[in-house]
Amino acid sequence: MTTARIKSAQLITIEGELKFPVIMQLRKQVESLLSGLNGTAQVDFAEVTSVDSSALSFWLCCLRFAKRNELELEPINLPVEMQGIAKLVGLEDLTN
């Protein structure tokens, strides 16, 4: 099961698979968590077990949501596979 939770004041952790079947549910969960934050927040991907190309779409949606809510979002421990997908499509700057 894939979940997102607040680990500390400005840190959200994601645990489990970051693949198409769970992306929409996870996106709603993360947006709900982000709506209670301000300033700069981090999303920790250390507990993500596997990704597919929808993981990058998920991250881009999180970034757009954060921007609309005047929140800066930083990824930490981004999976290598996700970085590779971003590089392949020319979006590596959004994963740094």
Image (cartoon, rainbow, N blue to C red):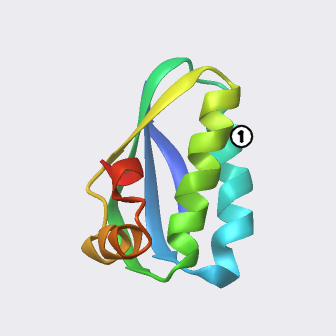
x then y, percent, for residue 33:
63, 38
Query: Taking 48 as reference, is 41 above or below it?
Result: above
- How many residues crowd mark 1 within 10 Å: few (<14), some (14–19), many (20+)? few
Circle 1 — which element?
helix
45 to the left or right of 14: left
Give residue 74's quadrant in the image: top left
17 to the left or right of 33: left
Query: Taking 62 as reference, is 74 above or below it?
Result: above
Count the marks.
1
x then y, percent, for residue 3:
56, 62
**Which quadrant would the N terminus be assigned to in this image?**
bottom right
Q: Residue at x 64, y 81 (%)?
A: 20
**One can see residue 36 in this view:** yes
Q: Which residue is drawn at 68% across and 83% down?
A: 21
Q: Nearer the viewer, residue 36 or 23?
A: 23
Q: What residue type is labelled 1?
A: Ser
Q: Which residue is drawn at 68% across and 24% down?
A: 69
Residue with the most extreme front position: 90
- Please give the residue where the numbered disc 1 appears in the rendered image: 32
**One can see residue 1 in this view:** no
